[in-house]
Image: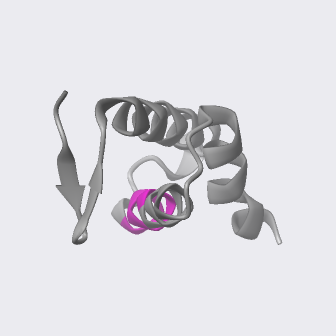
Amino acid sequence: MNIISIQDVSFDEAATLAMGEAFDRACKSLRSFWSAVTVRAIIAERIIEAAKNGERDPGRLYEQALKRSVA
């Protein structure tokens, strides 16, 4: 099992796969902003934060990443 460390937190392979899926989905849904590095960084930070809190479902990671974007 590979462990990946992000922001002093380690995630196992299942978590990183879920995070990657959520990130890709969020970026696709925000494709009009695709070139905006800042938007991708914010999405990544939100996914990492949700994963740090134990979330592993890609759909819920995606929803949590975009929840504050719309509000």
Q: Image quadrant of residue 70?
A: bottom right
Position in image of residue 5 (x %, y %): 19, 56
Residue at x-position 59% and y-position 50%: 55
Color style of the picture: one colour
Q: Using the image, determine if residue 17 lies above or below residue 6.
A: above
In the image as oriented, which residue stretches furthest toward the front? Answer: 1
Task: Give whichever of 60, 37 is nearer the camera.
Answer: 60
Position in image of residue 9 (x %, y %): 28, 65
On the picture, is 1 further left or further right than 41?
left
Quarter of the image for the C terminus: give it: bottom right
Q: Using the image, determine if residue 16 lies above or below residue 63.
A: above
How many marks the image carries: the answer is: 0
Magenta segment includes 39: yes
Q: Using the image, determine if residue 30 lies above or below residue 21.
A: below
On the picture, is 55 further left or further right than 12?
right
Residue at x-position 62% and y-position 36%: 57
Residue at x-position 55% and y-position 34%: 28
On the picture, is 25 further left or further right than 60?
left
Quarter of the image for the N terminus: give it: top left
Task: Give whichever of 32, 61 is nearer the camera.
Answer: 61
Q: Of helix, strand and loop, which mostly describes the magenta segment?
A: helix
Magenta segment includes 41: yes
Residue at x-position 43% and y-position 59%: 48
Q: Which residues are magenta?
A: 38-44
Position in image of residue 62 (x %, y %): 64, 44
Position in image of residue 40 (x %, y %): 42, 57
